[in-house]
Image (cartoon, grey):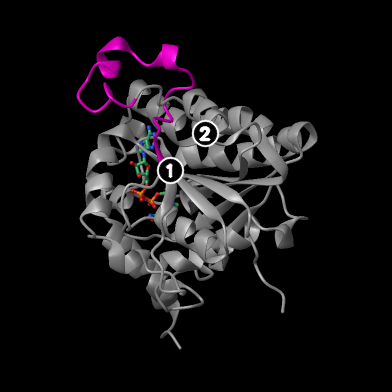
Amino acid sequence: MLQIDLTGRRAFVAGVADDAGFGFAIAKALAEAGATVCAGTWPPALNIFLNLLERGKMDESRRLRSGQLLSFEKIYALDAAYDTYEQIPEEIRVSKRYKDVGDCSVEGVAQRFVSDFGERPLDIVVHSLANGPEVKKPLLETSRAGYLTAVSVSAYSLISMVSRFGPIMREGGAFMSLTYMAGERVIPGYGGGMSSAKAALEGDTRTLAFEAGRRFGVRINTISAGPWASRAASAIGIIERMMDYVAKNSPLTSPLDPSDVGNVAAFLCSPLAGGITGTTVYVDKGYHAMGMGVEAVAEPR
Ligand SMILES: NC(=O)c1ccc[n+]([C@@H]2O[C@H](COP(=O)([O-])OP(=O)(O)OC[C@H]3O[C@@H](n4cnc5c(N)ncnc54)[C@H](O)[C@@H]3O)[C@@H](O)[C@H]2O)c1
């Protein structure tokens, strides 16, 4: 049987802080396929995440088909807004959530992987993080600082990760990220420069696939996922309505489940997808194919 087999591979999933988002679903799918999974968690969310894990609050969602619980080999504090320790402002370094986590920059985490597991510790790196402080504001009303933060944390962070993790990946390594259709079509309400960040992320996926493919021999793809009420998406304020609209107007009307995204991510990171790089793959029940809302013209059938 043809199988997604990631046995013996190590993955780093950056952007996991609970069991509700795509990062968690991807981590679970990678583990189902046999990979060892490490997580990267934003320092402000780290303690809550560790507490949820310790207190068994996520045991049900951690359950794998084998009956075992998904366990993270290591959980690293990661703030993808910073490439190096020197870039972390002093007031952040000494603040409550950061003072005990050490170097949580992208470079710092890459170095920790090497000191924890050796020179080439990774096969898979997943970028499942985004932050747009002004996401509720229309682009027209977004401040320069809000826009640049959205693009820095949600898009440049992928470039930073590929440049620092690319050299420590084993042969056949794969990067993956998550994008949203707002990068290519207008999604009213998805503001604050987040649409710009997703457009950058998709363009960069192509350019990085070429550059890092030649330099490190790695593949880079992004999944354009349909709307899902994760913690981050709930900050948009209209996520339930977005999900409802998409379910009513997509070719497939069954609701999207994060495991749909997790399974495709596991495939894209596996040797079965060895010929796929630089691509945006839609996991959205086909919504991207539509040009008009169903209810405007016909009774859904
Ligand atoms: N939920 C959706 O509707 C949807 C649709 C398409 C794409 N996406 C994308 O999926 C990815 C994962 O988001 P999600 O919706 O699963 O929500 P989520 O809340 O599970 O994940 C976002 C994560 O980013 C982390 N984060 C924020 N700022 C960070 C920083 N500076 N450094 C490190 N981590 C940081 C948060 O702590 C959180 O864990 C994002 O790129 C998001 O844009 C989401």
Question: What residue do we see at 30% from left, 17% from top?
Answer: 93
**Magenta span: helix, strand or loop, mainly?**
loop
Question: What residue do we see at 44% from left, 24% from top?
Answer: 105
Question: What residue do we see at 35% from left, 41% from top?
Answer: 191
Q: Residue 110: which quarter of the image?
A: top right
Give the amino acid type for the residue marked by disc 1 in the picture: Lys
Upstream in the sequence, badge 2 or badge 1? 1
Q: Which residue is mark 2?
A: 116
Specify the segment rendered in magenta.
Answer: 75-101
Residue 247 pos. (x, y %): 39, 72
In this view of the protein, can residue 41 be seen by the observer? yes
Disc 1 secondary structure class: strand
Q: Residue 57: which quarter of the image?
A: bottom left
Contact check, label 2 and label 1, Cβ < 8 Å: yes
Q: Is residue 94 magenta?
A: yes
Residue 251 pos. (x, y %): 51, 76
- What whole-number distance in Å separates the C-alpha atoms at marks 2 and 1? 9 Å
Position of 103 with respect to 170 (left or right) is left
Q: Which residue is mark 1?
A: 74
Residue 155 pos. (x, y %): 50, 35
Disc 2 secondary structure class: helix
Position of 70 with respect to 17 (left or right) is right
Q: Is residue 30 magenta?
A: no
